[in-house]
Image (cartoon, rainbow, N blue to C red):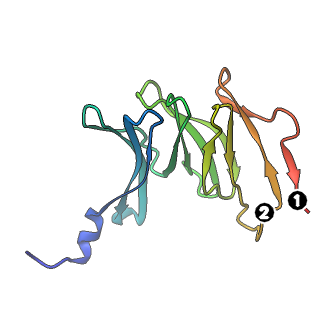
Amino acid sequence: MRKMRAEDIGSFVFVDTPVISPDGSKVAFVVTRNLIEEDRYESNIWLFNRKNISLKQLTSGGSDYNPAWSPNGGNITFLSKRGDEKRVGIWIIDPEGRGEASQILKKEGEIPQLSWSPDGENMLFLFRLETAEEVKEIESYTYQKARGRPTCGGPCHRRLS
């Protein structure tokens, strides 16, 4: 066995953030590769089907992370900084691969995590501006299934004192 060399780092593949579908049949997870020649990392969402033991790459955005299943298992939301390192977007994709991922919200700053409400009607996420030292505002969005995007259905923006 030979010793590890610096050029071997580019062949490392990191797997993290596994989330099991509500029915337990699938696992969405993040695969990250080190692109040494481009001096960056690339991360995409993959799907493992536990029934037929198969793998499928769901996204190819290059900066996709933090997958979350909708309660009925019909969608996976994830975060991405596609094309813009200062703005993070919430994206949604069909886990069966029907259609492309679509962006449903974009914010300047960081969204470290998001989750669905048990009834699938709302998404909750924490948000922090790059310049903010602490949370100053809270926003709440209702996911409109028919329109495929979140909306503010009432008082959705609250400033903390």
Res. 79 mark: none
Give the quadrant of the C terminus. Answer: bottom right
Give left or right: position of 112 versus 42: right
Picture coordinates of residue 86, whole percent (x, y): 64, 58
Picture coordinates of residue 74, whole percent (x, y): 50, 28
- Image height of 123 relative to 96, above or below: below
Give left or right: position of 59 versus 152: left
Q: Nearer the viewer, residue 151 or 40?
A: 151
Give the class, few, some or many, for how many residues have Cα within 10 Å of label 1's Cα (few <14, many ≥20): few
Residue at image x 56%, y 33%? 71
First in residue order: circle 2 vs circle 1: 2
Picture coordinates of residue 72, whole percent (x, y): 53, 29
Spot the residue most to the left.
1
Q: Nearer the viewer, residue 81 or 68?
A: 68
Q: How many marks?
A: 2
- Image height of 106 relative to 128, above or below: above
Picture coordinates of residue 105, whole percent (x, y): 67, 40
Res. 160 mark: 1
Residue type indicated by callout 1: Leu
Give left or right: position of 4 versus 122: left
Residue at image x 50%, y 51%? 65
Give the class, few, some or many, for how many residues have Cα within 10 Å of label 2's Cα (few <14, many ≥20): few
Give left or right: position of 62 versus 147: left
Residue type indicated by callout 2: Val
Instruction: Please tell me whether mark 1 sits on a helix, a strand or a loop.
Output: loop
Q: Name the residue tied to disc 2.
A: 135
Residue at image x 65%, y 24%? 145
What separation in Å lies between label 2 and label 1 (alpha carbons)?
8 Å
Residue at image x 52%, y 32%? 75
Instruction: Please tell me whether mark 2 sits on a helix, a strand or a loop.
Output: loop
Q: Is the residue under label 1 in contact with that under label 2 (CB below 8 Å)?
A: yes
